[in-house]
Image (spheres, rainbow, N blue to C red):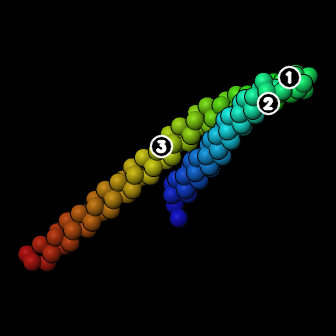
């Protein structure tokens, strides 16, 4: 295996790795959004309970404090995941660029090798023709 092919395989591996990280971060982002929806539903249910039973108002205040903390934590996590996704998008673009660079270099190397082989073949054919013409005369 030529070194160019090895570099291409390594670049493809890096692209695949970054894509897997992006997928995992997107799943985490989705899970956090679901958690926010769940928190909002829990708040709505708790508010509904309190509206029908005023005795639970004291409990609602404690619930609301906990809910606010949980929501703030989830939103902070969500912001972190979004930052991670932006960084991974940059990494992916760089990895694709590197992969393309190696593929282009390898294509050029193969084209040069084919051109050199063609030149050697033509030189051999010319030499054969000269030798044949010298024998014929």
- On the image, the x and y values in percent for residue 96 come to 51, 42
Q: Which residue is mark 3?
A: 101
Q: State the mark number for residue 78.
A: none
Q: Is residue 41 left or right of residue 115?
A: right
Cα distance in 3D space between marks 1 and 2: 9 Å
Nearest to the eye among marks 2 and 3: give it: 2
Q: State the mark number for residue 49.
A: 2
Cα distance in 3D space between marks 2 and 3: 62 Å
**Would residue 89 be visible to someone looking at this image?**
yes
> Along the line of sight, which residue is nearer the eye, 62 or 33?
62
**Are dots 1 and 3 in contact, CB under 8 Å?**
no
> Along the line of sight, which residue is nearer the eye, 87 or 67?
67
Nearest to the eye among marks 1 and 3: give it: 1
Secondary element type, mark 1 = helix
At horizontal 79% and vertical 27% (from top left) the residue drawn is: 52
Q: Which residue is mark 1?
A: 54
């Amino acid at each position: 295996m030529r070194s160019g092919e090895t570099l291409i395989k390594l670049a493809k591996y890096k692209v695949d790795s970054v894509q897997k990280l992006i997928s995992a971060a997107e799943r985490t982002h989705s899970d956090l959004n679901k958690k926010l929806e769940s928190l909002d539903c829990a708040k709505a249910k708790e508010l509904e309970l309190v509206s029908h039973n005023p005795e639970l108002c004291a409990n609602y205040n404690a619930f609301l404090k906990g809910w606010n903390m949980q929501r703030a934590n989830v939103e902070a996590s969500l912001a972190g995941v979004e930052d991670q996704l932006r960084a991974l998008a940059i990494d992916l673009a760089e990895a694709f660029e590197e992969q393309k660079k190696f593929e282009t270099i390898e294509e050029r190397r193969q084209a040069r090798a084919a051109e050199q082989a063609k030149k050697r073949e033509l030189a051999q054919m010319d030499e054969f023709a000269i030798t044949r013409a010298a024998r014929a005369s």
